[in-house]
Amino acid sequence: MDDPIITADAVTKQFRDGTRALDGLTVTIPTGTVYGLLGPNGAGKTTLIRILATLLRPDSGTVRVAGHDVLRHPARVRERIGLAGQFAAVDDHLTGRENIAMIGRLYGLSRREAARRAADIVDRIRLADAADRQVKTYSGGMRRRIDLAASIIGRPQVLFLDEPTTGVDPASRQDLWHLVRDLAAEGTTVLLTTQYLDEADQLADRIAVIDHGRLLTEGTATELKDRTGGAVVELDLPAQQQPAALRALEPLAPRHDRERNRIMLPAPDGALTLRHALRLLDHAGITPTDIALHRPTLDDVFLTLTRHTAREPAGRAA
């Protein structure tokens, strides 16, 4: 098995205003994977990306990217990475093609090679028709695609994507997803931060959930869902019937989700549990207005973990 391409061991970072962004965070990212980093606003995701990209120094801990320590050999790290931040870093007065080629030149490519790679990339991101227009005429989704294209012209071993599809229309989002999948298939390791849980579910081979600068859990999407619990039955009932329904369903250990005003039942036997619940309600003369059986989603994982940590005292994270 290949050595991990990214290791961050017991990394801490506190800013001058007292904000504790990372609090002993440890993550290990395998080579050639798409690794999703989830967390609420202020969890520390962007701070970690900035440290990995050598834009910020950790206070303590060790960080290695592509075999190099980010503090001892930052230039070697930069040669091997690409970065697309939360906001498209493009020059409005250059064309899309010129923006991409300019970054290629900064990577040390010859003028001819930068132009060749830029031409190839604009085809891959489906912007060939607009590549020779100034970027100031582009939509938000087009600007994001150009920004991502510029980050890969150097053919990085590791690509950092910090919320790459925020504010992007659905069609452009799908195009960016295809590009990320293609890059991973070609061997690029992608570290993706996102607040769109379906995005992590679609793209990430492994997912870490962080909050208050600490790692809460890590694994595949399936593993995280299984840790949250098995299948559940959800019942919608009129408010006046809910107390009676809770009594009728007592053998199935119901709980009242007050936020969504629903009755939830663990369903270890799936459809059999659902049938049992309906029989108990029928005997009590209660008819639900809506009923559903489903496995936990990443939304369930995220909310379960971050609701728990929200009750713990901690400094703000960035």
Image: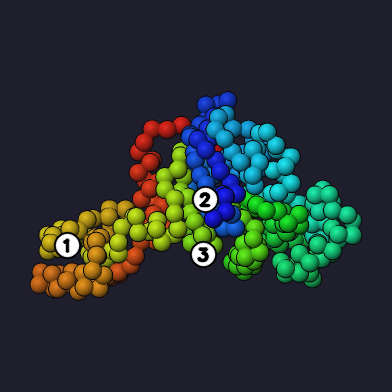
Left/right of residue 161 with respect to residue 92 in the rendered view: left
Q: Which residue of the protein is positioned furthest toward the left in this rendering?
A: 283
Q: Which residue is mark 3?
A: 202
Q: Mark 3 is on which residue type?
A: Gln
For the residue marked with disc 2, what is the amino acid? Answer: Leu
Q: Mark 1: which amino acid?
A: Leu
Q: Earlier in the sequence, mark 2 or mark 3?
A: 2
Residues at discs 2 and 1 in contact (Cβ within 8 Å): no
Task: Give left or right: position of 6 versus 252.
Answer: right
At x 31%, y 53%, the residue is 259
Circle 1 residue: 252
Residue tagged 2: 37
Q: Quadrant of residue 225?
A: bottom left
Q: Is residue 9 above or below residue 247?
A: above
Q: Residues within 10 Å of mark 3 (few under 14, many from 20)?
A: few
Left or right of 274? Residue 14 is right
Q: Is residue 48 above or below residue 120?
A: above
Residue under the image location 13 percent in, 60 percent down: 250
Q: Residue at x 41, y 61 (%)?
A: 222
Secondary structure at numbered mark 3: helix
Image coordinates of residue 279 in percent, x first then y, are 14, 73
